[in-house]
Image: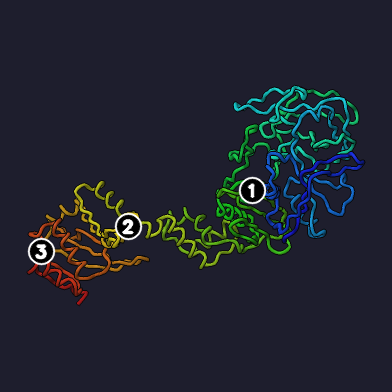
Amino acid sequence: MGYFKVKVYHGGWFTYKNGPLEYVGGETTVIEEIDGDRWSVFEAYAELKQLGYVEENIPSLWFKDPVAEDMEKNLKLFKTDADSIEMCRIAELRDHVDLYVVHKVQDEEMFLDVGYIDVGDKDGMCDISEGQELVPYGGVDEGGKQSKPFAADSGAEDDNEVGYDKSSDSDSLDSEYNPSGEEDDSEDDVHFTDSDDDVDPEVSGFQDVNVMSKKPRAVNKNACANEQFENVEGGDRDDLDFDHQVGSDSEHEGFTFPVHKLQKDMSQYKWEVSTLYASQDEFKDTVTAYAVHTARSIRFRKCDLQRVRAVCSGDCPFWVYAAKVRGEETWQLRSMNLTHTCTQAHRVGILRSKWLGKAFKKKVESNPKVKIKELVSKAQKKWNLTVTKSLATKTKQIALDQIQETFREQYKRIYDYGQELMRANPGSSVRIQVQRSPDLDSKAPASSRTSYCIFQRIYVCLEACKQSFQHCKDFIGLDGCFLKSPQGGQLLTAIGWDPNDQMLPIAYAVVEAETKDSWSWFLSQLASDVGLDKMGRSTFMSDQQKGLLPAYEEVIPGVDNRFCVRHL
C-alpha cells in the first residue's frame, strides 16, 4: 500500500434538518502523505490530535466513498483494521477518502426527547421513536463494582455524559447501521450507537439499554451490561489473558490488551489483533516459529524501527502486520490475514541461525560435542525442514555462546571467578593483574576521566595442590600452550611428580604471551606459594623456550634445569 490523502470533516455534527443525513458545521482539513501500511484507527486519532482534538472527546469516526451521494447508506464506522484496508482501497480509486468526526456530547439535556433506539430487523434498518429516555450508565467504581444507573433528567455533571467511548474496542457499534428519522438541530443531532451487542461495563462505562424491534416491548431502565463482551477483534473467545493496561482516565479503567505467550506447538498459535509483544525481536521470533512449525515460506516484506510486515510467498494472501506502540518499547499486532493458499515447503527462508540456536539450546547444552549431521537430522525429523550444514554449524556456535556466554563476558567476571575459587578452597592463591587506563592515574577531574581496566594475567594455586606438592619429589615441569579463543593468550602450567609417579598440577596461569616478563611473574608467584627452599632443591624440566632461562636466573638463580626429550 502506498500513500494517500484523507479529507477530514471535523467540528460539526450529523443532522436530518434538511431532509437526508448530512454533516453540517465545522470545517474541512485534507491530510496528505498518509502511509497505507501504518494507517489504523490509532493513527487517525494521532492525526486528529494534531488538529487540537482530545481522543476522549471523540466517541467515533465514520468514513465513506467521496463519490457516494447517499451518506446514510454509504457511511461506515471506522473501527477495525478491515476498515483501514477498505479506506486505503477507496483512496486508491478516488484519490482520497472522506473521514467524519463525531464529537462527544457536552449536554445531556439535549437527549431528553430522543427516546429509545431500535436496531431493527436483520436488514439493518432502524427507527428512532419517541416514548422513552436513554439511561446513562453511572460508570465503574474503583472497587470494581457497578454503580447504580441514574436518570437522564437528574441534573448530572458533564462527566457522566451520554456517549460511546472509543476506548471500548468491542463490537458495540455496527458498521452497517443506517440512521433514519429526523431530529432537531443541535450540537450533536444524531448519536450513532447500537445496543444489539452486549458491552462490558468495565470497558465501556455505559449501561446496556433494551431496544424495541418491529413489535414494541418494555424497556428496563435499570438494566446493566453485566455480560462479558464477545467477538474481541482478532479472536472469538472471552477468556483472553488481558494483563496489560494501556491508558486510563478519571471515569473509566484503562483498556487492556492480550499479551503474547509462547506456545510449544506454534502451529496452533492463535493470532489476535491488538496482541502486545515485548519487543520487535519477540514478534519476529513468533513469526519465525510459526513459519517453521507450519512449514510455510513466510518472509519479512518490511522491517524497520516502526513496523514489521510478514507475508507469504507467491500469491498466498497470508500476512501479519505489527507496529511499535507510541512512547513504549512494546509492539502491537495491528492487522492480519491468516488464510493460506500455498503448499507447505521444505525450505523456510525466514529461518535463521539465531532462532535455531535458541531452539537447539537444550540439545547442545546436554551434549556440547553434538555433530552437525545430528542437528540437520533433528530439524528434518522435528519440522520436516531442510537445514544446510553451514546453517547448522552457525546454529551450534550460537547455542554454545548462549550457554557459556561469550568469552568477553567471562573475562568481565574474572574477579567473581577468583572470589569463588577462594571461597570454595580456603587458603588458595588467586592473583589477577590488569592494565590500568592512563586516565585512572591522571590528575584530571573524575568526571572527565575514562576509567577502565584491561585484563592481562591471572595466577591460580589451589590450597590442596600447594600442600600435596610438599610431599612430592623435587621435580617441577614447566610448559605453556596457546589458548584457542577470540582473545588468545597463553596457558602456563607447573606440574609436580608425586611418589606414585603420577602428575600433580601445582599452579596455572593465563598470560598474554610466553615472554621473560610473564615467566618471571609466574615463577615469582609460584615461589611465594611453595617456598624458595623447595623450588631451589627441585629440578626443572622445560622446553627450549628462550624466556625461561633468564627467568630462572632472575627468580631462582643456580637452579638445576633439564630439557624435555620431546622438545630436543
User: Is residue 264 at least partly visible in the picture?
Assistant: no
Element class at badge 2: loop
Frontmost of labels 1 and 2 is 2
User: Is residue 8 at least partly visible in the picture?
Assistant: yes
Residue with the mark numbered 1: 268
Residue with the mark numbered 2: 451
Q: How many marks?
A: 3
Q: Position of residue 352 (x, y in %)?
A: 55, 62
**Residue under the image location 43 percent in, 58 percent down:** 401
Frontmost of labels 3 and 2 is 2
Position above or below: 516 against 279 = below
Q: In which quarter of the image is the C terminus?
A: bottom left
Lower sequence index among marks 1 and 3: 1
* Residue type beneath disc 3: Ser
**Residue under the image location 87 percent in, 33 percent down:** 128
Splitting the image into 4 quarters, where does residue 367 fall?
Answer: bottom left
The answer to the question of whether label 1 and label 3 lie on touching residues, with beta carbons closer than 8 A, is: no
Position above or below: 463 against 477 = above
Lower sequence index among marks 1 and 2: 1
Q: How crowded is mark 2: few (under 14 residues within 10 Å), some or many (20 or more)?
A: few
